[in-house]
Image (cartoon, helix red, strand yellow):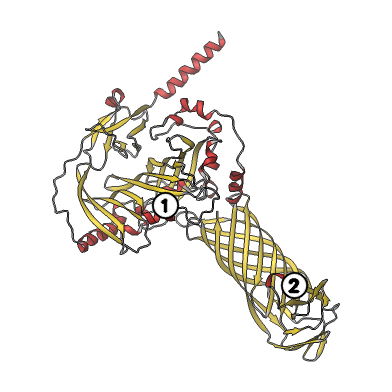
Amino acid sequence: MRKILISTVLFSFISFLYAQDDICRGQIINESSLVVPFVNISIKNTCLGTVSDANGNYKLIVPEYYADVTICFSCIGYESKEISVVQLRNNSDVMLSKANVQLSEVTIMPDSTLRSFLRKAYEKIPENYPAYPTQYEAFYREGIQNERKQYIRLVEAITRANKSSYKNAQSGTVQLVESRKYIDADSSQSFPISFYGGPHFIHEMDCVKERNAFLKPHNDYEYTYEGLTAYNGEEVHQVSFAPKAGSNKTIMGTMFIHVPTLSYLRFDLRLTEQGLKNRFEGLFIPGYGLKSLNKTYVINYQLRDSVCMLQSIFENEKIETKNGDIFYSPLEMVITNSKTANIAAIPFNSQMQVTYVPDREATDYLESDWKDYNTLSKVEVVDTLVAKQLFNNRHQPAHKKGQLGNFLRKLEVSYKIAYQPYQLTSGVRHLTYGEAIYGQNLHDAGTTLTLDMLIAYKLSLRINIGYIVEAGWSDTNLQEKHGPQIAYKLPLKTMGNNLFLEPQIAYVWHQFGRSVGIQQFDNDFSFGGKTFKNKKVQALPGIKHHGLQAGGNLLYQLSPMFYLDVNASYYMPVATDEVLFMKEKSGFFLTRKTAHEPLDETEGILRIDGVATQKSGATYDNWSMSIGLRMMF
């Protein structure tokens, strides 16, 4: 009896909670009973809304405080419709009528006139789109489907994204609010790769904010005026474009431009044949030979109080493997709410990295604290009740390829050119070693250029540990440095292109030698525990030391994965030894030997201006500077 009572009370409470909001769920069709995809749906006079999916299905949650509101349906090429939420409760399916547009101008436009018109639309971007920071809440879905359009991988996420003003082309930041995934552990292995960065499409596929080349207009594109259609009872220009022969551009499609304001309302895009060919070129996946057969995009914007704002992004790709298997990769991103005031920056620790791989890093379905949001109509496998039968499969450990991918995504790699000065005691140096006599007149100062490489592993978004390796390429100097380091990122700017200050500390082993010449030895000899053959051998008196190196990097984001890396460091040696380096200069370069002995223990005798000495006369300046590229996976 107690169990029944508790269950009854709990059921009543849950029913009460869901009764607070209206849930409108249906399908949008036209007069021919054909589905109408990508329809903008919004609660009138608010920023709340959604978009119908590729099958015309939609789902809109109307909060309880909007008791009797009007729902607006608008789509390019159709008459807009407004329906009260009360009517939608009884019949959520909506029929839109084709718009009858009377052409007010000829549809053949001279190329110069068309380009002038497109240039004017491009110049009006700062006026037609938000001139202030905006924040968007978005529903995101991506997956991999087999040939029967059944999901073998599926990820859903709720994200929050901040955009800067459309007066510039700077990218923005993304925060993951909720996520859940379904992976068919057996079938999923038949598709060999995972895609990264999808939730960042809210920035990367915002053609207007990114100022895509085809908008300008660009000389590498041919443009064709296709005529007029309608949106919300107003005329819309249709302009198609395609790359010119010989161009390296890989996008073609149609743009829809609002006649009264010259705002871009929609882009229907697809990859060219060359773009499809390049899609997986250079991607080495043994045994699969992936080929993209078709890849399309639809990007929707919506006019709100004379300002045009991003509303949705849809992408689909058809992929063929080497053995003829067909897969589909759909992606859907819909803005469900937006803010234009009191925009708080997304904290650095909460920012989603562009290398985020949804089907690897999203929360498993059973572990996800999923809430109900304004979303696309849920397909069968993601309906909360039905999905339990599918998602409630026994959890399987990550595949080895997935584990390797998780490790690689935590790596950072940097290549830089370093500038480092040194000092020398001026004078003529003579070195006698066995049968060989070296001699060189050296100046009192100089600099070395070296190639620096860093491989680091991210312990967190801020902290990484790594190993630095430095090597010079001069024939007259021996310059090598290596050692472990730890670094901490301090975000200076996270809107637009990121800017970080990265203090670091390392413990390094360093050796430096300055050549006094090359001599040919007639006989083999032993030096520094190695046997040198009767070859050309270079002698380099110098120093060998180890100690602390402290410094900092300034990292400026150039692209989603690449950063300009500028470094300044100061070296504090703990111990220094005066040594003689000997280096083979003939034979296969990978097998050439290098060794060293302390100057006070070697058989060689070093003289500077005729005076025997056990000091190389080399002093390495403690500071250095470098510049290069950092790749953050």
Q: Residues within 10 Å of mark 1 (few under 14, many from 20)?
A: some
Callout 1, which amino acid?
Answer: Glu
Marks 1, 2: nearer the viewer: 2
Callout 2, which amino acid?
Answer: Lys
Q: What is the count of numbered marks?
A: 2
Residue drawn where x is 48% and y is 17% of the image: 11
Residue matched to label 2 = 593
Residue drawn where x is 37% and y is 54% of the image: 273
Q: Residues within 10 Å of mark 2 (few under 14, many from 20)?
A: some
Instruction: Residue 257 in the image: state x and y as whole percent.
Output: 25, 51
* Residue at disc 1, secondary structure: helix
Q: Is residue 632 left or right of residue 294?
A: right
Q: Residue 556, labelled with which disc?
A: none
Instruction: Residue 154 in the image: state x and y as whole percent.
Output: 48, 37
Quadrant the N terminus occupies: top right
- Residue 483 visible in the snapshot: yes
Going from the N terminus, do you reach mark 1 or mark 2 first? 1
- Residue 48 visible in the snapshot: no
Q: Nearer the viewer, residue 45 or 113?
A: 113
Q: Nearer the viewer, residue 13 or 113?
A: 113
Q: Is residue 154 above or below residue 557?
A: above
Instruction: Spot the residue most to the front.
Output: 323
Separation (CA) of disc 1 from disc 2: 50 Å
Q: Is residue 432 above or below residue 8?
A: below
Residue matched to label 1 = 204
Instruction: Residue 296 in the image: state x and y as whole percent.
Output: 36, 47
Instruction: Residue 309 in the image: state x and y as whole percent.
Output: 33, 47
Q: Is residue 215 left or right of residue 343?
A: left
